[in-house]
């Protein structure tokens, strides 16, 4: 594809990916308003997030297969249309159950939107240098969206109500669909495969079971029948999923991909980044509103240190020595761990200024990881497996958001003793401390998994030979 067509294709596909970030951030600002307006308990409010993330995570891999088989542009357009329709249903929901159902439909649309968009980028930009520039541009657009969406969410939710946090998607979907139809060429995978329906079903049930256990444990207790049934059923479905996938000729997830240490390291980094950094787009606004007493618009502006760092640091990663993804992944995870710990300490001390500083550090680590994680995954497979790789990367991302949100809010629920702002801030300190421990362990894992060809551990590559 010529540069003339490649650049508009990159921008259109990246904007499509950014829709999912826009929605997550805007809804994150609106969550406290949704809870009050629909009289939703905090534990049940999780399903507004989980109802979207669950089908999103479950369908990303099959969405990549659908895109490879039936056409990436066609699947992209179907996803945009479904996402817009679901946004209308979310904006008109009259109950928490109706909103959760509409959010689930929105998650289906988002999967059919995001996975082909990433596959389009991976297919068009296959040269190493061009791919690096493309994923940096993608990361910048995603970061810019993270910078403006909290303020947009605060403005929209504060001025017009939480329903417009969803309805604002509709004109954007119309404009994006027109751009995709005009600018993007149709492409397909080299080999067409059948959908792995047993794999899709088992994966979705596994995510649902584990999420159910985390949510039920908060209300009924961690040893309750409901919680244990969720965890047990989820674990059984994971084992069944792995067994089914090993025996299928055209699996939803090709387990042979995980023979590569680089692939495993990249997936671990993506999951940890999503579970402990990207998930903060939905959690930190709740700290700012419920813990510090800010308005929705004030919380939107309060998110700027986090969002601006997410915007700037993908470009910082580009300026690091050309030593591959390993050092950037490990360093980014380490910075996220420090940022979570610093923000948690500041929340405990009740210092808004230090909370902002900690959020900036957390966002800086997230910015280093934002484009690099997807680049590392896409770079670990041949060009013809772009659909599978894009689905794997985004499945790891949104599985991380889903399980990270459920786990961290369970820590919050267990730590909050009453409804005062101070108690909520202390609960958030515990939440952030738990996130710091998780992401630090992930950094150590990636450090061991991703090494340079000459055997030098990835974290040392930048500070030794300059990564020749």
Image: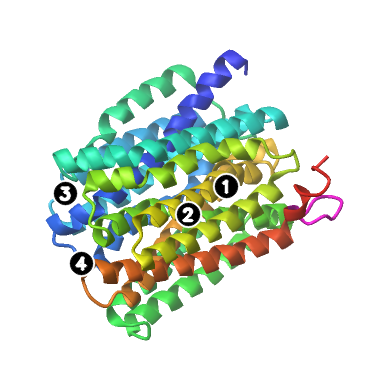
**Residue indicated by mark 2:** 277
Image marks 4 and 2: residues in contact by CB distance under 8 Å: no
Residue 70 appearing in the image: no
| Comes first in the chain, label 4 or label 3 | 4
Q: Residue 410 carries which label?
A: none
Residue 313's x, y, as percent? Answer: 55, 40
Residue 439 appearing in the image: yes
**Residue indicated by mark 4:** 41
| Comes first in the chain, label 4 or label 2 | 4
Secondary element at image label 1: helix
**Residue indicated by mark 3:** 93
Rendering quarter of residue 175: top left
- The stretch in magenta equals 451-458
**Residue indicated by mark 1:** 369
Image marks 1 and 4: residues in contact by CB distance under 8 Å: no
Secondary element at image label 4: loop
Q: Of 393 and 185, which appears nearest the observer?
A: 393
| Comes first in the chain, label 3 or label 2 | 3
Residue 316's x, y, as percent? Answer: 60, 38
């Amino acid at each position: 594809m010529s540069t003339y067509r490649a650049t508009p294709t990159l921008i259109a596909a990246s904007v499509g990916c950014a829709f999912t970030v826009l929605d997550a951030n805007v809804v994150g600002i609106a969550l406290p308003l949704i809870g009050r307006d629909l009289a939703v308990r905090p534990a049940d409010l999780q399903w507004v997030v989980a109802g979207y993330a669950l089908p999103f995570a479950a369908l990303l891999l099959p969405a990549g297969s659908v895109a490879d088989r039936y056409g990436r542009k066609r699947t992209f357009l179907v996803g945009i249309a479904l996402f817009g329709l679901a946004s209308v249903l979310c904006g008109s929901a009259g109950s928490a159950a109706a909103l959760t159902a509409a959010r689930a439909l929105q998650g289906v649309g988002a999967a059919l939107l995001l996975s082909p968009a990433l596959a389009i980028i991976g297919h068009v930009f296959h040269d190493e240098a061009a791919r690096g520039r493309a994923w940096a541009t993608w990361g910048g657009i995603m970061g810019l969206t993270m910078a403006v969406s909290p303020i947009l969410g605060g403005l929209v939710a504060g001025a017009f109500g939480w329903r417009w946090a969803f309805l604002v998607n509709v004109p954007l979907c119309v404009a994006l669909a027109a751009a995709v139809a005009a600018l993007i060429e149709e492409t397909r995978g080299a080999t067409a495969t059948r959908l792995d329906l047993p794999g899709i079903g088992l994966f979705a049930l596994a995510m649902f079971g584990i999420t159910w256990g985390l949510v039920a444990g908060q209300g009924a207790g961690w040893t309750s029948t409901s919680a244990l049934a969720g965890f047990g059923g989820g674990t059984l479905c994971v084992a069944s999923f792995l067994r089914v996938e090993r025996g299928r000729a055209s699996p939803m997830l090709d387990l042979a991909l995980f023979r590569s240490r680089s692939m495993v390291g990249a997936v671990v980094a993506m999951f940890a980044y999503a579970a402990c950094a990207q998930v903060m787009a939905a959690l930190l606004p709740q700290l700012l509103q419920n813990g510090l007493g800010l308005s929705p618009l004030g919380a939107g502006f309060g998110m700027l240190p986090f969002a601006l760092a997410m915007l700037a640091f993908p470009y910082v990663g580009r300026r690091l020595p050309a030593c591959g993804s390993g050092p950037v992944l490990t360093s980014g995870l380490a910075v996220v761990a420090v940022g979570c710990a610093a923000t948690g300490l500041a929340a405990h001390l009740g210092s808004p200024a230090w909370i902002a500083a900690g959020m900036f550090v957390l966002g800086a680590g997230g910015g280093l990881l934002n484009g690099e994680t997807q680049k590392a995954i896409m770079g670990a497979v041949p060009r013809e497996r772009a659909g599978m790789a894009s689905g794997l990367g985004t499945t790891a991302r949104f599985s991380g958001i889903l399980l990270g949100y459920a786990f961290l809010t369970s820590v919050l629920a267990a730590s909050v003793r009453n409804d005062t702002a101070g108690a909520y801030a202390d609960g958030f300190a515990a939440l952030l401390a738990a996130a710091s421990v998780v992401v630090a362990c992930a950094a150590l894992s990636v450090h061991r998994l991703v090494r340079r060809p000459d055997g030098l551990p990835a974290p040392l590559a930048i500070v030794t030979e300059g990564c020749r």
